[in-house]
Image (spheres, rainbow, N blue to C red):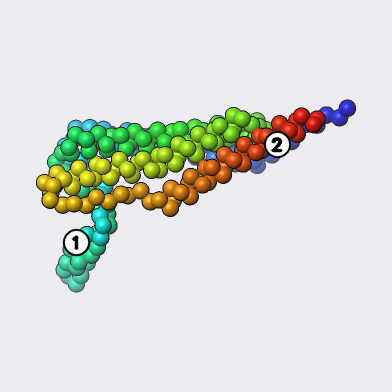
């Protein structure tokens, strides 16, 4: 009877995984800290800055000779309002909570995945679940963050124009969203098939 030992990862692989894990931890801390600081900034609901999308709205920019104004098409700008309506203020808070949660969940899943790989556990039910959770969370977060940001921007427009300026622009870019969903589904499928092949192979030994 012959026994086989699963090949271990090389030292170079281990170093690469450790660097990836360190970078992931830094990204998670930075993203969550940025969201917390933004919530602290928003919480008083006083002089709130909101990123707003425009639909090619004409505006004057001092880019002509001697700083003379030239009309440009405005696509994006930061609006500062004395205060936001309650629903818009809540949407801005929710946006930051979702952003922090998305970054945290995705990074934790990828760190756990790397840890499993370092222990020679590449294809397994656990890793398949981690990939699926990271993909689903990332896709939902990618869509939800700009959605709630758009709600907050609409409240800022309403407050500044007293309801006279209609600029409802959905800022969710569908093509990257579909691409992200496709990549997440593909990764989950690959790990699912890999785990099944591993179990089938183990059953033949």
Q: Quadrant of the N terminus?
A: top right
Q: Which residue is at 59% across, 32% downward? A: 127
Residue at the top extreme, as displayed: 1
User: Which of the pair 193/25 is nearer the observer?
Assistant: 193
Nearer the camera: disc 1 or disc 2: 2
The Cα–Cα distance between marks 1 and 2, rounded to whole angstroms, is 60 Å
Q: Which residue is at 38% across, 51% downward? A: 173
Q: Quadrant of the C terminus?
A: top right
**Percent of width and height locating residue 29:** 41, 34
User: Which of the pair 50/166 is nearer the observer?
Assistant: 166
**Percent of width and height locating residue 196:** 68, 34
Residue at the right extreme, as displayed: 1
Secondary element under disc 2, as helix, strand or loop, is helix
Badge number at residue 78:
none
Side of 197 where 142 appears, left or right:
left
Instruction: Identify the residue under disc 1.
Output: 59
**Percent of width and height locating residue 33:** 36, 34
Q: Earlier in the sequence, mark 1 or mark 2?
A: 1
- Do we see residue 39 in this rendering? yes
Which corner quadrant of the image does residue 122 belong to? top right
- Do we see residue 29 in this rendering? no
Which corner quadrant of the image does residue 49 belong to? top left
Badge number at residue 197:
2
Q: Is residue 134 above or below residue 50?
A: above
Q: Which residue is at 53% across, 46% downward? A: 183
Secondary element under disc 1, as helix, strand or loop, is strand
Q: How many marks?
A: 2
Side of 169 where 136 appears, left or right:
right
Instruction: Determine contact: label 1, label 2, CB under 8 Å.
Output: no
Q: Which residue is at 62% across, 36% downward? A: 192
**Percent of width and height locating residue 181:** 48, 45
């Amino acid at each position: 009877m012959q026994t086989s030992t699963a090949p271990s990862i090389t030292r170079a692989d281990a170093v690469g995984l450790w660097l990836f894990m360190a970078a992931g931890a830094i990204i998670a801390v930075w993203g969550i800290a940025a969201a917390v600081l933004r919530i602290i900034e928003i919480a008083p609901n006083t002089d709130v800055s909101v990123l707003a999308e425009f639909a090619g709205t004409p505006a004057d920019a001092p880019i002509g000779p001697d700083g003379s104004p030239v009309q440009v098409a405005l696509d994006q700008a930061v609006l500062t309002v004395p205060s936001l309506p309650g629903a818009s203020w809540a949407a801005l808070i929710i946006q930051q909570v979702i952003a922090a949660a998305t970054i945290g969940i995705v990074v934790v899943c990828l760190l756990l995945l790397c840890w499993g790989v370092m222990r020679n556990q590449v294809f397994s039910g656990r890793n398949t679940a981690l990939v699926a959770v990271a993909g689903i969370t990332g896709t939902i977060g990618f869509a939800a963050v700009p959605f709630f940001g758009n709600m907050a921007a609409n409240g800022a427009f309403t407050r500044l124009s007293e309801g006279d300026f209609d600029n409802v622009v959905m800022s969710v870019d569908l093509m990257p969203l579909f691409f992200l969903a496709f990549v997440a589904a593909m990764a989950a499928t690959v790990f699912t098939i890999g785990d099944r092949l591993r179990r089938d192979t183990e059953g033949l030994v």
